[in-house]
Image (spheres, rainbow, N blue to C red):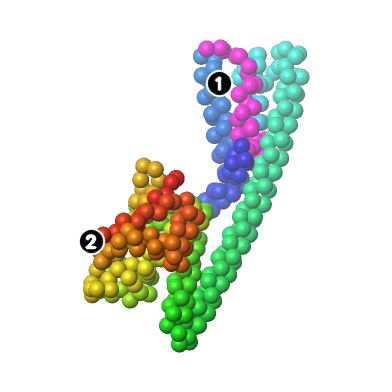
Amino acid sequence: MGRIGELDLPDRLAPYAPAWVTQLAFALLCMAAALLLRISVDLFAPGASPFALGYPAVLFATLFARWPAGLLCGLMSLAHSWFFMLPPVHSWTLKRPEDTPRLIVLIIAYLIMILIADLFRRAVRRAAAERDRQIAERDLFLEEFDHRVKNNFAVVAALLDLQRRRTTNAETAEALGTALSRVQSIARAHRHLYRGSTAPGEVDMGSYLDELCTALSEALFLHGAIVLDCTSDQVTLPRDRAVSIGLIVNELVTNAAKHAFTDRESGRISVEFRATARGWALSVIDNGRGTSPELLAKGREGGLGQRLTESFARQAGGELRAESGPEGTRITVELAR
């Protein structure tokens, strides 16, 4: 019902016609619809309820075109009932004494209906204006919040990069570079969250992972020798799961680029995100030298990157599975819906 009160035809058609023209035309339209219904009813029950169909006509005219349209429609409905329905028909003379109070009651009923409908319409429009104002304030707040968060990510990334460039210790520089990559992965998820192309709180995984892989390729200097490609089904996930998945990809691709191709000059790393019957599956595949099951187990128990990857997998609600051999390594994270 709220949407009915929000539709104001004089406002909607103001660029094309004055308000009074719109009100007159809509009142005539409502009256014409009532007359057509009256004719249809008279085919089966002539003269039944002579005033009944005037009420919806007056109501619609008031709701959609304000009280002047409702008043005009009420006057036309009253005149039609008086002249064509009350005996003697086609005459303004009232033959029966009870018809005069009937017309008075009808006038009062129309006036009450017009008053209530117009008050309802005004209240709904005020509520709609207040809602629009609150939405505008919320959008402004979200825009400001988004801007501040972006700035915060940029400051943190700049500080990490500055410290990485100034340090002379290789291990420290590598650790700072890894931390910088993680921060940038979270920042990318945030950017995709507020782009507005998906539902609120959702991240388009296809564009997010594609952008993430492009940035990783540039950051890890994977130009030509080692190719990084990314494919994804059309999937949207909640922000927190998307961030965890992005961090998993960041860790696994970085690890593969650093360790899988130590004995060769070229290779391929593939990131795949697919919908499955149970949920989704994230796979990071390389065609590097591979790792024995014993070393995989040892790595899972010791390395910080492995521990972080497993932690991110748990946060995303997934299970981590690794397969490795002479033809390369495949690490898959199965995510339940």
Residues in magenta, as a range:
44-72
Disc 2/disc 1 C-alpha distance (Å): 83 Å
Q: Identify the mark at residue 85; answer none if there is no mark.
A: none
Q: Secondary structure at mark 1?
A: helix
Q: Is residue 321 above or below residue 40?
A: below
**Image coordinates for residue 230, horizontal then vertical, percent:** 32, 61
226 falls in the magenta region: no
**Image coordinates for residue 94, horizontal then vertical, percent:** 71, 17
**Where is residue 208, by image quadrant?**
bottom left
Q: Which residue matches tag 1? A: 38
Q: Is residue 16 above or below residue 59?
A: below
Q: Is residue 131 visible?
A: yes
Q: Is residue 139 above or below residue 223?
A: above
**For the view shown, which residue lies furthest in the front direction?**
294
Mark whose residue sits in front, 2 or 1: 2
Q: Which residue matches tag 2? A: 327
- Residue at 30 percent of width and 63 percent of height: 291
Q: Amino acid at mark 2?
A: Glu
- Residue at 59 percent of width and 39 percent of height: 4
Q: Nearer the viewer, residue 191 or 65?
A: 191
**Image coordinates for residue 103, horizontal then vertical, percent:** 72, 22
Asked if residue 336 lies left or right of residue 38, the reply is left
Q: Amino acid at mark 1?
A: Arg
